[in-house]
Amino acid sequence: MSEETTLTIDGLSVKARKGDTILKAALDHNIYIPHLCYHPELTPFGGCRLCMVKIQGRGLTISCKAPVEEGMTVITEDPAINAIRRIAAELLIANHDARCLECAKNTRCKLQEIAAYIGISDERLGRLQPVVRTLPVDDSNPFFIRDFNRCVLCGICVRTCQEIQMLGAIDFTFRGVDTKIATLGDKPILHSTCVSCGECVVRCPVGALLPKKADTPTRQVNTICPYCGVGCGIKLGVRGNTIVGVQGDVDGPANRGRLCVKGRFGIAEFVHHPDRLTTPMIRKNGRLEEASWDEALDLVASRLRGYTPAEVGVIASAKCTNEENYVIQKFARAVLGTNNIDHCARLCHAPSVAGLVQSFGSGAMTNSIDEISDSTCIFAIGTNTTEAHPIIGLEMIEAVRRGGKLIVANPREIDLVRYADLWLRHSPGTDVALLMGMMRVIVDEGLADSAFINERCEGFEAFTESLKDFDLGFVEQVTRVPRAKIVEAARMLATNGPAAIFYSMGITQHSHGTDNVLAIANLAMITGSVGKPSSGVNPLRGQNNVQGACDMGALPNVYPGYQAVSDPNIRKKFESAWGVSLSPTPGLTLVELMEAAYRKDMKALYIVGENPAISDPDIQHVRQALSRLEFLVVQDIFLTETTEFAHVVLPGASFAEKDGTFTNTERRVQLVRKAIEPIGNSRPDWWIVCQLAHRLGVSGFEFDDASDIMDEIGSLTPSYGGVNYERLSHGGLQWPCPTDDHPGTCILHTRGFVRGKGRFMPLRYTPSVETPDEQYPLILTTGRSLYHFHTGTMTRKVAGLNVIEPGGVVEISPEDASRLGLAQGDRVKISSRRGEVVAGAKVTDVVPSGVVYMDFHFAESAANILTNPVFDPVAKIPEFKVAAVRVEKA
Ligand code: SF4
Ligand code: SF4
Ligand code: SF4
């Protein structure tokens, strides 16, 4: 059956897809029909009646709701239609604030467009006795205003919030002449459930919703959001050398135009913040003083020359581009002669790499973001997706809307729980027990996918043997999840699959993080949920380019493309390409580097774009370690808590000031384009590192530009072999992309696992290292907020984000608060064996009794003063997610 329909519009024969509306068919063929409440991404509303047309033989109808039919003849304009449109438009205009010249939407307003099309006369308008509305303007949100005097009640904002943001923060209220769009209880929008995504603002057809900062750009530059690992495509609006706005890129494969609050409103202000570092600085007499590039680079080169490879280490950056991370690791290995290179993936997804490589042969997300909404069953464990990866959160909720099942496992009642069919509220640190308990049910009830297991996997017998330790009575007691719920979750997952499993740092940041990941891999294999669309094991990467920094070999044991430094053949390949001899010994991990600095074995550190004085566990210890270094270089865009210890500070350029690539969480390599010149005397990180290499007399760093670097990456990294700037300029590529004619890979392990057979791993339950006791009776768990990013270096420079979330609080359950005599907003002291911090108490049911929660973004109440530096023996990730603490009134 043909999917196409032929109809006639104004005498023109046009083709449309079955199911399209007449309005869509007309607009697709550049036939204008006036409309105000229609938006192509939203359910038709039919409220404005401006899109009225006549269907021959039937009469008048609203074209935004009428589907096309074969042979249909449509007339878009005649006297009867025009009369109806004119009345509808005149009523809207009569009720609209007519001071168009004062409106930022002037010349881009749909109502003006319609007025011009229909032709409105003052005489007729006069007869309508225009109403001058004087409704108060809601300017509570720091990023946009709501002016109801300009609202035409098209309902686009309401549908946007319901259908795109899936929140329903606003709705039609006060029906009748007083109808207006309002929040629940007509509160200012800042005090509603609105998450400030701005999606309604960009869709409002008139000037009723307007960004507070709205200069018109003179050019737009397509690039990628510098915040989380979703990798949203953005268009930076630029005027002169200033970013004046950000739009979602509708062609961005990860976001299709949507953005969260950080991407939409949190960029221009940090890029142009007066605190940006604009010149190199050298510490003299205890103070950082401005210096020239030559002076600073000469000093760094001469000091680094004085250390042996074992005495020096480099920390690369998940915020920097692939090209920069490649150059940084090459500098560590080829110039400093050390594999002591690591980055913050150690603190987030090292267990994903370590665990998934053992099970599958590859440590990355197996599937793609655009498959999520078609999932029939999603299992989200240890991920607060709507806050940490907001656009992926939307995709998950869309899957639920389409009928998919959603199981959430999280100690906190996160937003996703509202959409879940089942919520497993397990105790922090008991993931292995929960997952093994579910798998025990799957095996016992004969729900395992035997065909998949027999054909594609190995080690199943030994694994099922280890399930014997996970009797449901034991699992219930350890996890505190009722047995019936564990059974229900197991059945739901096994019978609605293939399942798409998502996890993040709730799984990895444990002293048994690798076991947690292995348990997830087992669960995916036992349910046959790998290598198929809308399924798989999907670790959600935190920072914009943490996937790329790993891919580029900013790790102590592997070169780019996860090629082992200990493999003689691989080493030989890099030695001959780089013209140097390389160390065969894997280097120290991030946590080990700090420990070595504390012991004074590590004498010099070169840190690029990271802030370990806030992001690492037990930061008082980290600060002591940093203070013991003989020489510390920090390269960043702002002064940070870490630069307090630096001997030299080098000013890097922000993402908006350089070309390069980021690789997002779904392995998609995407172009980052220079939109403005570097601020002040800052320089791209790759340029700075290359200058140092020249000064240290090592060749191989004579790159002309970032594209040159990518060509070298491609020549040495099989999974990036087919990635180059010419191809990327037509859109991103998902690795593995080994050759120039390879299209990239959306789904991993489709025919076989990268390692051959998928490997089931037997597991035991190991409790977290610190469990509550009399002295420290509560469990502290930490995480991220929607409104801030990592250590706040960038987001805390954005005034509006600070208005919405000004600082850190500690979430505590009503039961614990009442037991401790604490009330909402009380200042409380939270102490662990490492130290203490003070924060406001937020008494909430979001956390269960016995557990308290803090975001880790805020220096003044730094959660990482409290966290436990014990680490997973395989991945060396610290146990951020479980620390025993005491809470008392400050
Ligand atoms: S800004 Fe986003 S969350 Fe807030 S009302 Fe608009 S669509 Fe809804
Ligand atoms: S605020 Fe804008 S989008 Fe919302 S109903 Fe009014 S005119 Fe339409
Ligand atoms: S922070 Fe993440 S979800 Fe938000 S716009 Fe940026 S990439 Fe997209």
Image (cartoon, rainbow, N blue to C red):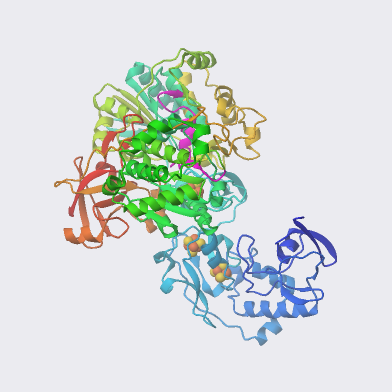
Magenta region: which residues? Answer: 533-558
557 in the magenta segment? yes
The answer to whether residue 588 is above or below residue 470 is above
Furthest residue toward left: 774
Dividing the image into four quarters, tell me where ligand 2 lies.
bottom right
Q: Nearer the viewer, residue 108 or 101?
A: 108
Question: What residue is at 37 percent from the left and 23 percent from the top?
Answer: 340
Q: Report whether residue 144 is seen.
A: no
705 sits to left or right of 288 = right
Residue 486 versus residue 602 in the image, above or below = below
Residue 106: percent from left, percent from top: 62, 66
Nearest the eye: 270 or 825: 825
Q: Position of residue 578 (x, y in %)?
A: 52, 16
Foreground: 112 or 602?
602
- Could you tell me residue 722's position as x and y percent? 62, 29
195 left or right, relative to 843: right
Q: Is residue 631 visible?
A: yes
